Image (spheres, rainbow, N blue to C red):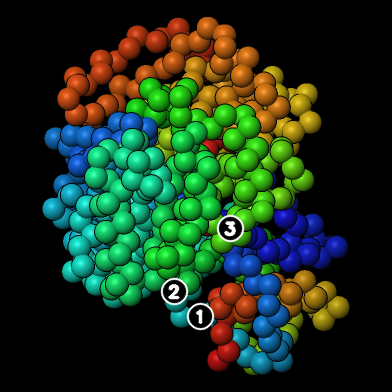
Amino acid sequence: MRGLLTVTSSAAEVASFDPDLSWRLHPKVAVRPEPFGALLYHFGTRKLSFLKNRTIVEVVKSLADHPDARSACRAAGIDDAQQAPYMHALRVLAQSKMLVLQ
Amino acid sequence: MTSVDSAPAPATQPVPRLIEQFEHGLDAPICLTWELTYACNLACVHCLSSSGKRDPRELTTQQCKDIIDELERMQVFYVNIGGGEPTVRSDFWELVDYATAHHVGVKFSTNGVRITPEVAARLAASDYVDVQISLDGATAEVNDAVRGAGSFAMAIKALENLAEAGFKDAKISVVVTRTNVDQLDDFAELAARYGATLRITRLRPSGRGADVWDELHPTAEQQVQLYDWLVAKGDGVLTGDSFFHLSGLGEPGALAGLNLCGAGRVVCLIDPVGDVYACPFAIHDRFLAGNILSDNDSGPGFANVWKNAPLFRELREPQSAGACSSCGHYDSCRGGCMAAKFFTGLPMDGPDPECVEGYGAPALARERVKPRSSVDHSRSQPVMLKLSTSRLRSDVAAKAAPVRLCNESPV
């Protein structure tokens, strides 16, 4: 289980996640800080996800303040060369409807 | 948790395994079971909480609402409500409404007694309530032998009412026993018929379950049968990570879920009088962390018990593998279930009674003392006196608690 997040949906299908668009947390998603990062809970789908470090938490929480996902990552100190795992995590979150376009 | 996805970690930034992070405990439980009453219309032979009669000290409506307020502050996203039969509390629906209005989702377990067409319609209208109907046989004959005459028909009626009201995705919750393990396909069919999801869990020797465990727990052959069924057909079947003691039977990861047990770390139980136990299968003084109402060592309130109770702090410390340390399967089963060992009278740092390597069987054959809980609300029999088991209890206390306490994670 080495990764930035763990989600409870199988999320096997490849959903479209465009990092050049502006995303935000689904309004029914709550974020609970934890020592390792945070828990996300979607009251609509009743799915739980684990954000496994604080940087990904910062990215997820600040998505709505940025014009696109890439700039949210840059603002959290992740330069473009390091973004791949973060983009993967965001894609999985979008697949499980934790993130929505805004 | 039925399935898990994870993203690869950046090479420059290794992330500890989630299970390691969980072993130190979370700021609030993920999976909180709350038994609202010891009263029950049934008298299942394997009842984990030895329920039957209401306890006169049970929490009042206001006390329950105060707890819900605290859970909201702690961001406990949902509670698993059980009992006894929780729906026989006259304020049950009021509490469900109060919880969901305060961002605490509810999943409740019921034998179906109060799931009338009207109730089903009301449940279907809520986004935040999940219903779990208990059924321990796919036929009346098998079910009623465990849960009592008429209980099969009552559960099926509840499932019919829910389906007719348009309630989506009810859960059918089955405790796997020697007598129903051959019916797993039938349970899956039953679930499909009502648009429900099948959930199967392990029989624990807790509560009245201690009295019937020897006869009812699946045989070694049946454990393999169960494991094979889960691997072949377990997609979409919930297990609450119940069967991690079987994970040594195959490849790591073949069983869905984190296979994490987290009593006192991510899991706990609030009982009807406000006592907090390490997990729903451990209603015994040995696993009592404190009471929500009384100002114990850790202070009043649930958050204080969760954060500060000495028992929970102890459970969040690194644990030793004990007699299992040389076993090649230890990494996958971690010595099995604390409650299963404790209530069958086995050493806490030895193998699970249903150890897949067969180490449990000789341990069970030896002389052992089965600790009984002082908490018993069974009808038609006197409440058990506290047995003097001080020698045994001090033995237990002297040993390190096991790494894995049985987890009923819903995630």
Badge 2 marks a residue whose secondary structure is: loop
1 and 2 marks in contact (CB < 8 Å): yes
Q: Is residue B386 left or right of residue B191?
A: left
> Which labelled disc corresponds to residue B2?
3
Q: What residue type is labelled 2?
A: Gly
Q: Depth check: give the residue in front, B401 or B302.
A: B401
User: x, y (%) of residue B389?
Assistant: 39, 10
Q: Which amino acid does label 1 sit on?
A: His
Kindly report which numbered mark, 3 or 2, lies closer to the viewer in this rendering: 3
For the N terminus of chain B, the image quarter is bottom right
User: x, y (%) of residue B153?
Assistant: 27, 51
Q: Which chain carries label 2?
A: A
* Local crowd size for mark 2, using a 10 Å CA cut-off: few (<14), some (14–19), many (≥20): some
Above or below residue B112? Residue A91 is below
Q: Mark 2 points at which residue?
A: A44
User: x, y (%) of residue B89?
Assistant: 17, 50
Which residue does the image show at 33% across and 31% down from the upper left? Answer: B45
Asked which quadrant contains residue A24, the reply is bottom right
Kindly report which numbered mark, 1 or 3, lies closer to the viewer in this rendering: 3
Above or below residue B243? Residue B355 is above
Badge 1 marks a residue whose secondary structure is: loop
* Local crowd size for mark 3, using a 10 Å CA cut-off: few (<14), some (14–19), many (≥20): many
Q: In this view, does A62 lie to the left or right of B94?
A: right
Which residue does the image show at 71% across and 38% down from the upper left? Answer: B249
Q: In this view, does B252 lie to the left or right of B352?
A: right
Q: Name the residue under label 1.
A: A26
Badge 3 marks a residue whose secondary structure is: loop
Q: Depth check: give the residue in front, B260 or B246.
A: B246
